[in-house]
Amino acid sequence: MTMLAAVTEAEFATLREGLEVSDSVLSKHVTALADEGYVKSRKGVHAGRRTTWISMTGPGRTALRQHVAALRELIADVD
């Protein structure tokens, strides 16, 4: 999610390489996030090959902000 926060959308392969996971692992996570309405995907062609683009939805951005805020609270309580 944090990789998607900085961009409008990202190519599946770019996410896979950045996260250093297999296609199947990333696919399962994208499916779970899509089922929650946090991300959406679209198929397209890039540089002559089929590809999948992943983007974060509005509810996904809200959920990420809330998650980061909760983590910051936890960290602040440690000090």
Image (spheres, rainbow, N blue to C red):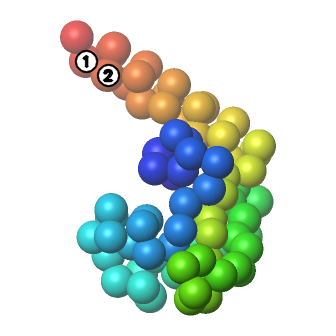
- Label 2 to label 1, Cα distance in Å? 5 Å
- Could you tell me residue 74's position as x and y percent? 37, 24
Left-right relation of 35 to 28: right
Count neighbours of disc 1 (C-alpha within 10 A) and say few if under 14, some if 14 to 19, many if 20 or more.
few
- Could you tell me residue 55's position as x and y percent? 66, 57
| Viewer-proximal residue among 17 and 58 | 17
The residue tagged 1 is 78
- Could you tell me residue 67's position as x and y percent? 53, 36
Figure check: 55 above or below 34: above
Residue 48: mark: none
Residue 75: mark: 2
**Count of all numbered marks drawn on residues in the image:** 2
Which residue sits at x=43%, y=19%?
A: 73
Residue kind at label 1, given as amino acid type: Val
Which residue sits at x=34%, y=14%?
A: 76
Figure check: 8 above or below 75: below
Left-right relation of 69 to 8: left
SS of the residue under disc 1: helix
| Viewer-proximal residue among 44 and 42 | 44
Look at the image and tell me in which quarter the C terminus lies. Answer: top left
